[in-house]
Amino acid sequence: MNIMPNRMDRGFYAYQQEFEQKALEVLRSGWYILGKEVSAFEQEFAEYTGAKHCVGLANGLDALWIAFRLLNIGKGDEVIVQGNTYIASVMGITMNGATPVFVEPDENYGIDVEKIESHITERTKAILVVHLYGMASRMDKIVELCKKYKLKLVEDCAQSHGACFNGQMTGTFGDVGCFSFYPSKNIGAFGDAGAVVVNDEKLANDFRVFRNYGSEKRYHNKVVGANSRLDELQAGMLRVRLNHIDEMTDEKIAIAKRYSEEIKNDKIILPKLAEDATCVWHQYVIRCEERDRLIDYLNNFGIGTIIHYPIPPHLAEAYKYLGHKEGFLPITEHYAKTVLSIPMYNGMTKEEQDFVIKAINEFS
């Protein structure tokens, strides 16, 4: 049996007729940029998250860097972010000239809220929370800190579409919620796509202007903006996906439940949710001190895995200029050496799940 770590084709075939019908509808419309599909998706996604406004963008990285740009965070400013994240989170900060200040994660892979305050300085302007692997982070203390120190709060929700903390959806706690709709995400497009959700009407309009060359009216450019527009075809595909998100999420939750209940191996550390948090299981991430041997072992059974992520941003060559050396973030670095994402995707059969569970349980 050959089991890939992720499969996007099955998610397509599950709703093939709807996707193809929508694609033809958009293609035949003759309108491909900033039309009715984008407007409809923005309204529907805002309603889904509970935010007042959604603005579609070209991708998740654009959502991040434009967010910090419009919040006027740049050179000389510091942004607190967890160490164990994908490098795009940090790029959103540094592309504006600001400095990332790294904080260790907790046992749930979110930022350790108990360690944030000691990193706040007079230069701190924002906290960037990353809801990693689809797990909602502990937001209550973070919101309190932002209010106490008058900090901006940005959420990286690239992997947490639909995850909640204390009943409130990720992306709606702070100033901006940033989303990626890369094809592998829980709400995935068929190419690059992204969005932000905000509650402030002026900020939402600033995003709309900035994404379209800084233009509110054609050929009238208010600011030097960017070309970061969610296109009509991807918006249409996302509307189909959004219409089925609850059943797709429930399917992943069911797979994760099986893994959590049936994987029993002392060498394997299973993921654990924070209190009052939910997870939409973008990835199911285990930890193993003998990870490389486990990868080879699973490969021999045809079971694919991915490491999310093998090099923490503070040790990336791109951020060598920050001066951080190995040992700077021991928990983050230990996670990078031990985490492993096992197969998790919509359309995964019971037989495939059984095979993965049995193989991991027999690893010795």
Image (cartoon, rainbow, N blue to C red):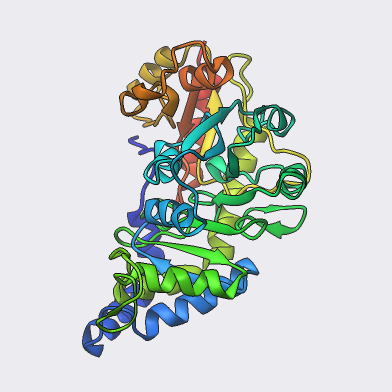
Residue 268 falls in which quadrant of the image? Answer: top right
Residue 323 falls in which quadrant of the image? Answer: top left
Between 180 and 269, the one nearer to me in the picture: 180
Q: Is residue 40 above or below residue 296?
A: below
Q: Position of residue 257 (x, y in %)?
A: 64, 42
Between 127 and 260, the one nearer to me in the picture: 127
* Quarter of the picture holding the N terminus: top left
Total number of numbered labels? 0
Q: Please give the name of the residue rendered at 31% of the width and 62% of the height, measured from the top-left corner.
A: 190
Q: Horizontal placement of 3 versus 269: left or right?
A: left
Q: Position of residue 128 (x, y in %)?
A: 57, 44
Q: Is residue 158 above or below residue 286?
A: below
Between 216 and 254, the one nearer to me in the picture: 216
User: Could you tell me if residue 243 is visible in this image?
Assistant: no
Q: Is residue 123 above or below residue 282?
A: above
Q: Please give the name of the residue rendered at 44% of the width and 13% of the height, measured from the top-left corner.
A: 325
User: Could you tell me if residue 218 is visible in this image?
Assistant: yes
Q: Position of residue 83 (x, y in %)?
A: 53, 29
Q: Is residue 205 above or below residue 93?
A: below
Q: Position of residue 88 (x, y in %)?
A: 40, 42
